[in-house]
Amino acid sequence: MKQDIHPKYTKVTVTCANCGKDFETRSTRSSIKVDICSNCHPFYTGKQVLVDTAGRVERFKKRFAKATSQSK
């Protein structure tokens, strides 16, 4: 392998934006921030949590209701 062409592989802290949990891993980046981690993800916790971003669910339901009422 060529010398001095590979990035530095160091320990970094990964921070979850949702629950605030920190854990350590190795990466070429200086820090990593994730939206959701295994500590708060519904698949791993077994709890269903609806994450509604800016009313997207309501907009979908409204469009779906309009489409079904027009087709009848």
Image: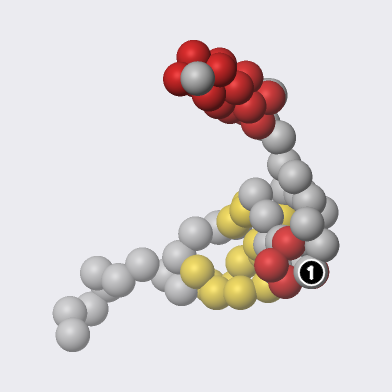
Determine which quarter of the picture holds residue 65. Answer: top right
Residue toward you, 70 or 19: 70
- Residue 32 percent location from the top left of the image: 59, 56
The answer to whether 32 appears left or right of 8 in the picture is right
Residue occupying the far front of the picture:
72
Determine which quarter of the picture holds residue 48. Answer: bottom right
Residue toward you, 6 or 47: 47
Q: Is residue 52 above or below residue 44?
A: above
The residue that disc 1 covers is 46
Which secondary structure, mark 1? loop
- Residue 61 percent location from the top left of the image: 63, 27
Q: Is residue 35 above or below residue 13?
A: above
Residue drawn where x is 55% and y is 74% of the image = 26
Specify few, some or many for label 1: CA neighbours under 10 Å numbering under 14, 14-19, or 20 or more: few
The answer to whether 62 appears left or right of 44 in the picture is left
- Residue 46 percent location from the top left of the image: 79, 69
Residue drawn where x is 68% and y is 72% of the image = 24
Report whether residue 12 is seen: yes
